[in-house]
Amino acid sequence: MTDYPVVIAEWERNALEVVRVSLDCYRGHYTIDIRVWWFAGKDLKPGKTGITLGVRNLEQLAKAINDARARAAEIGLVDRG
Protein backbone atom coordinates (compact mmCIF):
# COMPACT_ATOMS: atom_id res chain seq x y z
CA MET A 1 0.00 0.00 0.00
CA THR A 2 1.21 3.49 -0.86
CA ASP A 3 1.73 6.06 1.86
CA TYR A 4 0.23 9.43 0.93
CA PRO A 5 1.05 12.11 0.07
CA VAL A 6 3.52 11.12 -2.66
CA VAL A 7 5.70 14.15 -3.43
CA ILE A 8 6.37 14.29 -7.17
CA ALA A 9 8.31 17.55 -7.39
CA GLU A 10 9.33 20.44 -5.19
CA TRP A 11 11.23 23.64 -5.91
CA GLU A 12 12.05 26.86 -4.15
CA ARG A 13 9.68 29.72 -4.89
CA ASN A 14 11.64 32.14 -2.72
CA ALA A 15 13.61 32.05 0.54
CA LEU A 16 10.45 31.41 2.58
CA GLU A 17 8.36 29.16 0.33
CA VAL A 18 8.47 26.09 -1.89
CA VAL A 19 6.10 24.84 -4.57
CA ARG A 20 5.17 21.19 -4.15
CA VAL A 21 3.37 18.84 -6.55
CA SER A 22 2.01 15.72 -4.89
CA LEU A 23 -0.46 12.91 -5.26
CA ASP A 24 -2.73 12.35 -2.28
CA CYS A 25 -5.77 10.49 -1.08
CA TYR A 26 -8.45 12.48 0.75
CA ARG A 27 -11.55 10.74 2.09
CA GLY A 28 -11.10 7.95 -0.42
CA HIS A 29 -10.59 10.26 -3.41
CA TYR A 30 -7.24 10.40 -5.22
CA THR A 31 -6.00 13.91 -5.94
CA ILE A 32 -3.16 15.89 -7.43
CA ASP A 33 -2.17 18.88 -5.33
CA ILE A 34 -0.06 21.81 -6.55
CA ARG A 35 0.51 24.09 -3.60
CA VAL A 36 2.81 26.70 -2.10
CA TRP A 37 4.25 25.54 1.24
CA TRP A 38 5.89 27.88 3.76
CA PHE A 39 8.55 27.37 6.37
CA ALA A 40 7.57 27.42 10.05
CA GLY A 41 11.02 27.10 11.54
CA LYS A 42 12.38 23.94 9.93
CA ASP A 43 8.91 22.52 9.21
CA LEU A 44 6.93 23.05 6.02
CA LYS A 45 3.26 24.01 6.31
CA PRO A 46 0.75 23.99 3.45
CA GLY A 47 -0.38 27.40 2.32
CA LYS A 48 -3.76 28.46 0.99
CA THR A 49 -2.27 29.19 -2.43
CA GLY A 50 -2.68 26.19 -4.67
CA ILE A 51 -5.04 23.85 -6.41
CA THR A 52 -6.27 20.34 -5.69
CA LEU A 53 -7.93 18.33 -8.44
CA GLY A 54 -9.13 14.78 -8.77
CA VAL A 55 -6.60 12.62 -10.62
CA ARG A 56 -9.24 12.20 -13.32
CA ASN A 57 -8.22 15.75 -14.35
CA LEU A 58 -4.53 14.89 -14.60
CA GLU A 59 -4.43 14.39 -18.38
CA GLN A 60 -6.20 17.70 -19.06
CA LEU A 61 -3.90 19.49 -16.61
CA ALA A 62 -0.78 17.98 -18.20
CA LYS A 63 -1.97 19.00 -21.67
CA ALA A 64 -2.80 22.53 -20.53
CA ILE A 65 0.63 22.95 -18.91
CA ASN A 66 2.40 21.59 -22.01
CA ASP A 67 0.34 23.91 -24.21
CA ALA A 68 1.14 26.87 -21.94
CA ARG A 69 4.86 26.06 -22.08
CA ALA A 70 4.80 25.78 -25.89
CA ARG A 71 2.95 29.09 -26.21
CA ALA A 72 5.29 30.79 -23.74
CA ALA A 73 8.23 29.60 -25.86
CA GLU A 74 6.55 30.88 -29.06
CA ILE A 75 6.20 34.37 -27.61
CA GLY A 76 9.66 34.39 -26.04
CA LEU A 77 8.78 34.05 -22.36
CA VAL A 78 10.85 30.85 -21.88
CA ASP A 79 13.58 29.02 -23.76
CA ARG A 80 12.45 26.49 -26.33
CA GLY A 81 13.97 23.50 -24.39
Image: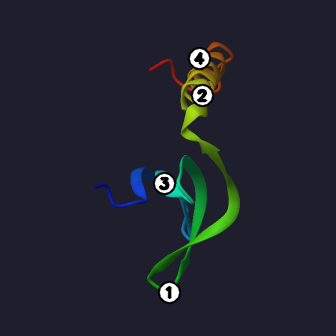
Nearest-to-viewer mark from 3 and 4: 3
**Cα gap from disc 2 to disc 4, whole angstroms:** 9 Å
Mark sitting earlier along the chain (1/3)? 3
Q: Residues within 10 Å of mark 4 (few under 14, many from 20)?
A: some
Of the residues tagged 1 and 3, which is closer to the observer? 3
Q: Indicate which disc, 3 or 4, sits on the residue closer to the N terminus.
A: 3
Mark 2 or mark 1, whichever is nearer to me: 2
Residue 47, image x, y percentages: 65, 67
Q: Which mark is residue 65?
A: 2
Q: Quadrant of the C terminus?
A: top left
| Residue in the foreground of this view, choosing between 44 and 54 | 54
Report which residue position mark 4 lands on: 70
Q: Amino acid at mark 2?
A: Ile
Mark 4 is on which residue type?
Ala
Q: Secondary structure at mark 4?
A: helix
Which residue was labeled with disc 3?
24
